[in-house]
Image (cartoon, grey):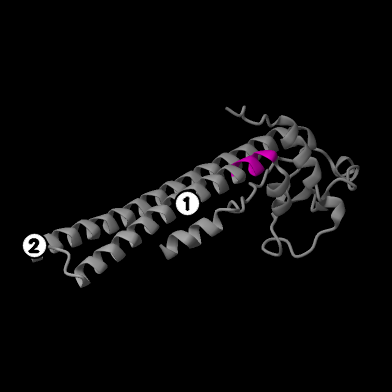
Amino acid sequence: MKRLNYLLNGLSALALIVLFSQCTPKTDNQAAAMSSTQASGELSGMKIAYVEVDTLLLKYNLSVDLNEAMVKKSENVRLRLNQKATDLDKQKQEFQAKVQNGAYASQERAQSEYNRIAKLEQDLQTLANTLQTELVSEQDKNSLLLRDSISAFLRDYNKTKGYSLIISNTGFDNLLYADPQYNITKEIIAGLNARYSAPIQK
């Protein structure tokens, strides 16, 4: 159950998605490359920019919708398991009270009730494992969907921008310092959200 609680607590936020680098061959001469220094970084003729992934995941509407759906589903799982665990605890307490009061007509009858409760406990653990696996599987699918969405957008976006490299920045994991002029996060978020259509609520 403790593992399940750790999982549920962690599901309020999707795993960080590493953006794929977009590489396009440079055929322009140095003079043409130097004309866009305000929009990108220049390194040996390369046109470079970066995206703050944390900000992207917080503000991309698809990411927000997926996260909200996972939080809701995780909460439903938690409530369901807690209710079953409470019911099981109540049955255990009733069984123990009956044993102490000698309420069972025979040892066989008491053993049968004990086995029934033990089976319920085993079934609850199996259910918890199954639901945990389902949540992890859905989270993985959501992460793949999000990554593919971002990657597809960047491919289209870069057809006109011509970046040699778009770097992902997550805290201090990948990029320790970069001039803010090379940050295209807002532009990417705006483009993603403009292209995204939220699912119709049923």
Label 1 element class: helix
Query: Which of the 4 image quadrants contains residue 163?
Result: top right
- The chief SS type of the magenta part is helix
Q: Residue 129's spot in the image, x, y percent?
A: 36, 54
Q: Residue 175's spot in the image, x, y percent?
A: 73, 61
First reached walking from the N terminus: tag 2 or tag 1 = 1
Which is nearer the eye, 69 or 124? 124
Disc 2 + disc 1, Cβ < 8 Å:
no
Which is nearer the eye, 81 or 156? 81
Q: Is residue 103 left or right of residue 60?
A: left
The magenta stretch spans which residues? 61-66
Q: Which residue does the numbered mark 2 point to in the structure image?
A: 108
**Type of amino acid under label 1:** Leu
Mark 2 surroundings: few (<14), some (14-19) or many (≥20) residues within 10 A? few
| 3D distance between C-alphas at marks 2 and 1 | 35 Å
Q: Residue 59's spot in the image, x, y percent?
A: 73, 45
